[in-house]
Image (tube, coloured by chain):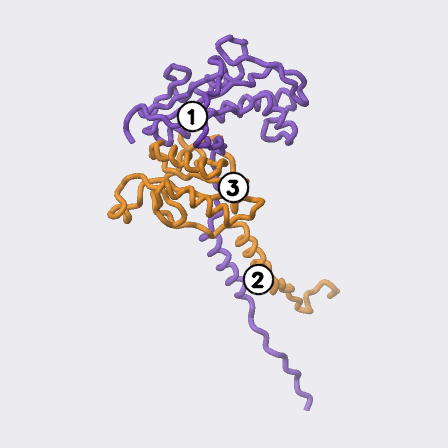
Amino acid sequence: MARKKRKAPSINATSSADIAFMLLLFFLLTSSMDTDRGLPRRLPQPVPKDQKKEDVDIKKRNLLVVLISSSNQILCGGEYVDIKQLKDRVKEFVENPYNDEHKPEKIDVDVPLFGNMMVTKNHVISLQNDRGTSYQAYIDVQNELAAAYTELRNDVSQKKFGKIFAELDEEQQKAVQTIYPQKISEAEPKNYGGGK
Amino acid sequence: MGKFNKAGGREMPELNTSSLPDLVFAFLFFIMMVTSMREVSLKVVFRSPQATELQKLEKKSLVTFIYVGEPMQEFRAQMGTATRVQLNDNFAEISEIESYIAQEKGSMKEEDAPFMTVSIKADKETQMGIITDIKQALREAYALKISYSASPRVNPL
Protein backbone atom coordinates (compact mmCIF):
# COMPACT_ATOMS: atom_id res chain seq x y z
CA MET A 1 0.00 0.00 0.00
CA ALA A 2 1.45 3.21 -1.08
CA ARG A 3 0.64 5.24 1.90
CA LYS A 4 1.48 8.86 2.16
CA LYS A 5 4.63 9.40 4.19
CA ARG A 6 3.77 10.86 7.53
CA LYS A 7 5.54 13.96 8.59
CA ALA A 8 6.41 14.55 12.19
CA PRO A 9 4.01 17.21 13.38
CA SER A 10 5.82 20.45 13.97
CA ILE A 11 4.98 22.70 16.86
CA ASN A 12 3.30 25.84 15.85
CA ALA A 13 5.90 28.43 16.72
CA THR A 14 4.21 31.55 15.51
CA SER A 15 3.37 32.72 18.99
CA SER A 16 6.86 32.30 20.41
CA ALA A 17 7.76 35.64 18.91
CA ASP A 18 4.95 37.16 20.92
CA ILE A 19 6.17 35.49 24.07
CA ALA A 20 9.65 36.80 23.46
CA PHE A 21 8.27 40.26 22.91
CA MET A 22 6.42 40.08 26.20
CA LEU A 23 9.65 39.18 27.98
CA LEU A 24 11.43 42.00 26.22
CA LEU A 25 8.79 44.50 27.27
CA PHE A 26 8.94 43.28 30.84
CA PHE A 27 12.68 43.85 31.01
CA LEU A 28 12.42 47.20 29.29
CA LEU A 29 9.93 48.38 31.88
CA THR A 30 11.53 47.02 35.02
CA SER A 31 15.19 47.77 34.39
CA SER A 32 16.47 51.27 34.60
CA MET A 33 18.08 52.56 31.50
CA ASP A 34 18.47 56.03 32.91
CA THR A 35 22.02 57.17 32.88
CA ASP A 36 22.80 58.97 36.03
CA ARG A 37 23.84 62.54 35.41
CA GLY A 38 25.54 64.86 37.76
CA LEU A 39 28.15 67.48 38.40
CA PRO A 40 31.47 65.71 38.79
CA ARG A 41 33.88 67.13 41.34
CA ARG A 42 37.11 66.09 42.98
CA LEU A 43 37.48 66.30 46.71
CA PRO A 44 40.79 67.42 48.16
CA GLN A 45 43.04 64.93 49.87
CA PRO A 46 42.31 64.43 53.54
CA VAL A 47 44.49 66.34 55.94
CA PRO A 48 46.58 63.98 58.04
CA LYS A 49 45.57 64.27 61.67
CA ASP A 50 49.05 64.87 63.06
CA GLN A 51 49.85 67.56 60.56
CA LYS A 52 49.37 71.15 61.62
CA LYS A 53 47.07 73.03 59.39
CA GLU A 54 49.25 75.19 57.27
CA ASP A 55 47.70 78.15 55.60
CA VAL A 56 48.44 78.23 51.96
CA ASP A 57 49.37 81.77 51.17
CA ILE A 58 47.24 83.04 48.34
CA LYS A 59 47.50 86.59 47.19
CA LYS A 60 44.33 88.46 47.85
CA ARG A 61 43.87 89.42 44.22
CA ASN A 62 43.94 85.77 43.18
CA LEU A 63 41.13 84.75 45.45
CA LEU A 64 37.41 85.02 44.85
CA VAL A 65 35.28 84.01 47.78
CA VAL A 66 31.80 82.80 46.96
CA LEU A 67 29.80 82.34 50.09
CA ILE A 68 26.29 80.95 50.29
CA SER A 69 24.58 81.99 53.47
CA SER A 70 22.09 79.97 55.46
CA SER A 71 19.28 81.92 53.80
CA ASN A 72 20.68 80.98 50.38
CA GLN A 73 21.97 84.44 49.56
CA ILE A 74 25.15 84.57 47.56
CA LEU A 75 28.04 86.72 48.61
CA CYS A 76 30.57 86.97 45.83
CA GLY A 77 33.78 88.83 46.55
CA GLY A 78 32.14 90.66 49.43
CA GLU A 79 28.99 91.77 47.62
CA TYR A 80 25.57 90.28 47.48
CA VAL A 81 24.87 89.09 43.96
CA ASP A 82 21.97 87.41 42.27
CA ILE A 83 22.50 83.89 40.97
CA LYS A 84 22.08 85.20 37.43
CA GLN A 85 24.97 87.62 37.80
CA LEU A 86 27.29 85.06 39.31
CA LYS A 87 28.41 83.51 36.05
CA ASP A 88 29.53 86.81 34.55
CA ARG A 89 31.29 87.75 37.76
CA VAL A 90 33.21 84.50 37.74
CA LYS A 91 34.02 84.77 34.05
CA GLU A 92 35.36 88.25 34.51
CA PHE A 93 37.39 87.12 37.48
CA VAL A 94 38.94 84.12 35.74
CA GLU A 95 39.58 85.85 32.45
CA ASN A 96 40.64 89.27 33.76
CA PRO A 97 40.25 90.84 30.33
CA TYR A 98 41.47 94.33 31.22
CA ASN A 99 44.40 93.28 33.37
CA ASP A 100 42.79 94.82 36.41
CA GLU A 101 45.14 94.80 39.35
CA HIS A 102 42.44 93.65 41.70
CA LYS A 103 41.81 90.60 39.57
CA PRO A 104 44.13 87.57 39.33
CA GLU A 105 47.61 88.16 38.03
CA LYS A 106 48.40 86.93 34.56
CA ILE A 107 51.40 84.74 34.11
CA ASP A 108 53.16 83.96 30.88
CA VAL A 109 52.68 80.25 30.23
CA ASP A 110 53.83 78.22 27.28
CA VAL A 111 50.69 76.35 26.27
CA PRO A 112 51.03 73.49 23.79
CA LEU A 113 49.31 74.21 20.45
CA PHE A 114 48.73 77.81 21.45
CA GLY A 115 52.18 79.19 22.17
CA ASN A 116 52.77 81.73 24.88
CA MET A 117 49.63 82.94 26.55
CA MET A 118 48.89 85.12 29.52
CA VAL A 119 47.04 82.88 31.91
CA THR A 120 45.50 83.59 35.28
CA LYS A 121 47.15 80.49 36.55
CA ASN A 122 46.99 81.09 40.25
CA HIS A 123 43.38 82.08 40.61
CA VAL A 124 41.29 80.25 43.15
CA ILE A 125 37.57 80.35 43.64
CA SER A 126 36.79 79.52 47.19
CA LEU A 127 33.31 78.15 47.61
CA GLN A 128 32.04 78.37 51.13
CA ASN A 129 28.69 77.40 52.46
CA ASP A 130 26.84 77.35 55.68
CA ARG A 131 25.47 74.25 57.31
CA GLY A 132 21.99 75.64 56.78
CA THR A 133 22.36 76.30 53.06
CA SER A 134 19.91 74.34 50.96
CA TYR A 135 21.29 71.76 48.57
CA GLN A 136 19.53 73.22 45.55
CA ALA A 137 21.18 76.60 46.16
CA TYR A 138 24.55 74.92 46.47
CA ILE A 139 24.02 72.97 43.24
CA ASP A 140 22.90 76.18 41.52
CA VAL A 141 26.14 77.88 42.46
CA GLN A 142 28.25 74.86 41.51
CA ASN A 143 26.40 74.81 38.21
CA GLU A 144 27.02 78.50 37.52
CA LEU A 145 30.71 78.08 38.30
CA ALA A 146 30.92 75.15 35.90
CA ALA A 147 28.97 77.11 33.30
CA ALA A 148 31.41 80.02 33.57
CA TYR A 149 34.36 77.75 32.91
CA THR A 150 32.54 75.98 30.08
CA GLU A 151 31.80 79.28 28.37
CA LEU A 152 35.35 80.52 28.69
CA ARG A 153 36.71 77.27 27.33
CA ASN A 154 34.20 77.23 24.51
CA ASP A 155 35.17 80.77 23.54
CA VAL A 156 38.84 79.98 23.26
CA SER A 157 38.21 76.65 21.52
CA GLN A 158 35.88 78.30 19.05
CA LYS A 159 38.47 80.93 18.25
CA LYS A 160 41.35 78.54 17.84
CA PHE A 161 39.82 75.35 16.46
CA GLY A 162 36.36 76.42 15.33
CA LYS A 163 34.73 73.83 17.58
CA ILE A 164 33.33 73.84 21.08
CA PHE A 165 35.37 72.40 23.91
CA ALA A 166 33.47 69.13 24.16
CA GLU A 167 34.20 68.28 20.53
CA LEU A 168 37.95 68.77 20.71
CA ASP A 169 40.29 65.82 20.92
CA GLU A 170 42.14 65.02 24.10
CA GLU A 171 45.30 66.96 23.37
CA GLN A 172 43.39 70.09 22.43
CA GLN A 173 41.23 69.79 25.52
CA LYS A 174 44.34 69.56 27.68
CA ALA A 175 45.70 72.71 26.10
CA VAL A 176 42.47 74.61 26.67
CA GLN A 177 42.38 73.35 30.23
CA THR A 178 45.83 74.79 30.77
CA ILE A 179 44.54 78.18 29.75
CA TYR A 180 41.48 77.98 31.98
CA PRO A 181 42.22 75.54 34.77
CA GLN A 182 39.20 74.85 36.92
CA LYS A 183 40.16 75.83 40.41
CA ILE A 184 37.30 75.58 42.78
CA SER A 185 38.27 75.07 46.35
CA GLU A 186 35.64 73.87 48.73
CA ALA A 187 36.61 75.17 52.10
CA GLU A 188 36.32 73.35 55.36
CA PRO A 189 32.82 73.71 56.73
CA LYS A 190 31.96 76.64 58.90
CA ASN A 191 28.91 77.42 60.91
CA TYR A 192 27.86 81.03 60.68
CA GLY A 193 24.12 81.19 60.67
CA GLY A 194 23.38 78.82 63.50
CA GLY A 195 20.94 76.11 62.59
CA LYS A 196 21.85 72.50 62.07
CA MET B 1 -2.41 34.59 -24.68
CA GLY B 2 -2.70 33.11 -21.35
CA LYS B 3 0.84 33.85 -20.48
CA PHE B 4 0.04 36.48 -17.94
CA ASN B 5 -3.05 34.87 -16.65
CA LYS B 6 -3.10 33.89 -13.11
CA ALA B 7 -4.34 30.56 -14.06
CA GLY B 8 -1.87 28.80 -11.88
CA GLY B 9 -3.41 30.36 -8.80
CA ARG B 10 -0.08 31.43 -7.47
CA GLU B 11 -0.11 32.59 -3.90
CA MET B 12 1.91 35.21 -2.25
CA PRO B 13 4.83 33.37 -0.68
CA GLU B 14 4.67 33.57 3.07
CA LEU B 15 7.39 35.35 4.95
CA ASN B 16 9.37 32.90 6.98
CA THR B 17 9.03 34.07 10.55
CA SER B 18 10.61 31.11 12.24
CA SER B 19 13.74 33.08 13.11
CA LEU B 20 11.86 36.03 14.52
CA PRO B 21 11.89 34.71 18.10
CA ASP B 22 15.65 34.33 17.88
CA LEU B 23 16.02 37.92 16.78
CA VAL B 24 13.86 39.12 19.62
CA PHE B 25 15.76 37.01 22.11
CA ALA B 26 19.05 38.44 20.91
CA PHE B 27 17.64 41.90 21.44
CA LEU B 28 16.35 40.87 24.85
CA PHE B 29 19.80 39.75 25.93
CA PHE B 30 21.27 42.99 24.69
CA ILE B 31 18.83 44.97 26.82
CA MET B 32 19.57 42.79 29.82
CA MET B 33 23.28 43.45 29.43
CA VAL B 34 23.18 47.21 29.11
CA THR B 35 20.63 47.98 31.78
CA SER B 36 21.17 47.48 35.42
CA MET B 37 18.63 45.65 37.48
CA ARG B 38 20.53 46.46 40.62
CA GLU B 39 18.12 49.00 41.89
CA VAL B 40 17.88 49.58 45.59
CA SER B 41 14.51 50.30 47.02
CA LEU B 42 14.48 53.89 48.06
CA LYS B 43 13.67 54.58 51.64
CA VAL B 44 14.16 58.30 51.53
CA VAL B 45 12.26 60.93 49.62
CA PHE B 46 14.54 62.09 46.86
CA ARG B 47 13.77 64.89 44.45
CA SER B 48 16.88 65.65 42.48
CA PRO B 49 18.09 69.22 42.18
CA GLN B 50 18.27 70.79 38.76
CA ALA B 51 21.33 71.90 36.87
CA THR B 52 22.49 72.45 33.31
CA GLU B 53 26.18 71.55 33.24
CA LEU B 54 25.62 67.85 33.64
CA GLN B 55 27.92 65.06 32.68
CA LYS B 56 27.06 61.42 32.41
CA LEU B 57 28.59 58.92 34.75
CA GLU B 58 30.53 56.59 32.52
CA LYS B 59 30.95 53.24 34.14
CA LYS B 60 28.03 52.06 36.13
CA SER B 61 29.89 49.28 37.88
CA LEU B 62 32.28 51.82 39.40
CA VAL B 63 29.59 54.04 40.82
CA THR B 64 28.45 53.87 44.41
CA PHE B 65 25.35 55.70 45.46
CA ILE B 66 24.61 57.57 48.64
CA TYR B 67 21.03 58.69 49.07
CA VAL B 68 20.19 61.60 51.32
CA GLY B 69 16.73 62.80 52.20
CA GLU B 70 13.84 62.62 54.58
CA PRO B 71 12.53 59.12 55.36
CA MET B 72 9.48 58.05 53.41
CA GLN B 73 6.06 58.19 55.01
CA GLU B 74 6.02 54.58 56.14
CA PHE B 75 9.34 54.89 57.98
CA ARG B 76 8.59 58.16 59.71
CA ALA B 77 7.13 56.45 62.76
CA GLN B 78 10.49 54.89 63.60
CA MET B 79 12.94 57.27 62.04
CA GLY B 80 11.33 60.68 62.47
CA THR B 81 11.40 63.31 59.78
CA ALA B 82 14.99 64.44 60.08
CA THR B 83 17.16 64.03 56.99
CA ARG B 84 18.79 60.62 56.87
CA VAL B 85 21.41 58.85 54.82
CA GLN B 86 20.67 55.64 52.97
CA LEU B 87 23.41 53.24 51.98
CA ASN B 88 22.30 50.24 49.93
CA ASP B 89 18.98 49.24 51.39
CA ASN B 90 19.28 50.58 54.89
CA PHE B 91 19.36 53.79 56.81
CA ALA B 92 22.82 54.60 58.06
CA GLU B 93 24.75 57.06 60.12
CA ILE B 94 27.42 59.32 58.69
CA SER B 95 30.03 57.41 60.66
CA GLU B 96 29.21 54.25 58.73
CA ILE B 97 30.06 55.79 55.38
CA GLU B 98 33.76 55.25 55.74
CA SER B 99 33.46 51.50 56.29
CA TYR B 100 30.81 51.26 53.58
CA ILE B 101 33.12 52.87 51.06
CA ALA B 102 35.97 50.62 52.13
CA GLN B 103 33.73 47.60 51.68
CA GLU B 104 32.59 48.75 48.24
CA LYS B 105 36.17 49.35 47.24
CA GLY B 106 37.09 45.88 48.41
CA SER B 107 34.47 44.31 46.21
CA MET B 108 35.89 45.99 43.13
CA LYS B 109 38.76 44.85 41.04
CA GLU B 110 41.98 46.26 42.33
CA GLU B 111 42.79 48.19 39.18
CA ASP B 112 39.34 49.74 39.17
CA ALA B 113 39.36 50.96 42.75
CA PRO B 114 41.04 54.34 42.06
CA PHE B 115 38.35 55.17 39.53
CA MET B 116 35.53 54.63 41.93
CA THR B 117 32.97 57.40 41.81
CA VAL B 118 30.52 58.19 44.53
CA SER B 119 27.29 59.69 43.37
CA ILE B 120 25.56 61.76 46.01
CA LYS B 121 21.85 61.66 45.40
CA ALA B 122 20.51 64.21 47.78
CA ASP B 123 17.11 65.76 48.01
CA LYS B 124 17.06 69.36 46.91
CA GLU B 125 15.67 70.56 50.22
CA THR B 126 18.52 69.01 52.16
CA GLN B 127 20.59 71.31 54.26
CA MET B 128 24.25 71.46 53.39
CA GLY B 129 25.40 70.45 56.87
CA ILE B 130 24.78 66.78 56.26
CA ILE B 131 26.28 66.97 52.76
CA THR B 132 29.39 68.56 54.20
CA ASP B 133 29.65 65.78 56.75
CA ILE B 134 29.34 63.20 53.99
CA LYS B 135 32.01 64.95 51.96
CA GLN B 136 34.35 64.93 54.93
CA ALA B 137 33.68 61.23 55.47
CA LEU B 138 34.38 60.52 51.79
CA ARG B 139 37.63 62.43 52.00
CA GLU B 140 38.68 60.33 54.95
CA ALA B 141 37.77 57.20 53.02
CA TYR B 142 39.81 58.36 50.03
CA ALA B 143 36.82 58.32 47.73
CA LEU B 144 37.71 61.60 46.11
CA LYS B 145 35.78 61.36 42.88
CA ILE B 146 32.25 62.43 43.55
CA SER B 147 29.31 63.50 41.51
CA TYR B 148 26.39 65.58 42.69
CA SER B 149 23.49 63.88 41.04
CA ALA B 150 21.07 66.26 39.36
CA SER B 151 18.53 66.28 36.59
CA PRO B 152 18.42 68.62 33.60
CA ARG B 153 16.85 71.96 34.36
CA VAL B 154 13.23 72.32 33.37
CA ASN B 155 12.19 75.64 34.81
CA PRO B 156 14.60 78.52 34.25
CA LEU B 157 16.56 80.08 37.03
Check disc 2 and report its element: helix, strand or loop. Answer: helix
Give the label on residue B116, or none: 3
Whether callout 1 and callout 2 share a subunit is answered: no
Give the label on residue B21, or none: 2
**Kind of residue indicated by mark 2:** Pro
Rounded to the nearest angstrom, the CA distance separating label 1 from label 2 is: 58 Å
Residue B6 image point, x, y percent: 68, 65
**Kind of residue indicated by mark 1:** Ala
Residue in front for this viewpoint, B17 or A73: A73
Residue A28 image point, x, y percent: 48, 52
Residue B16 image point, x, y percent: 63, 64
Left or right of B121, for residue B36: right
Rounded to the nearest angstrom, the CA distance separating label 1 from label 3 is: 23 Å
Q: Which chain is orange?
A: B
Check disc 3 and report its element: helix, strand or loop. Answer: loop
Q: Name the residue under label 1.
A: A187
Relative height, residue A57 to residue A49 (above, below): above
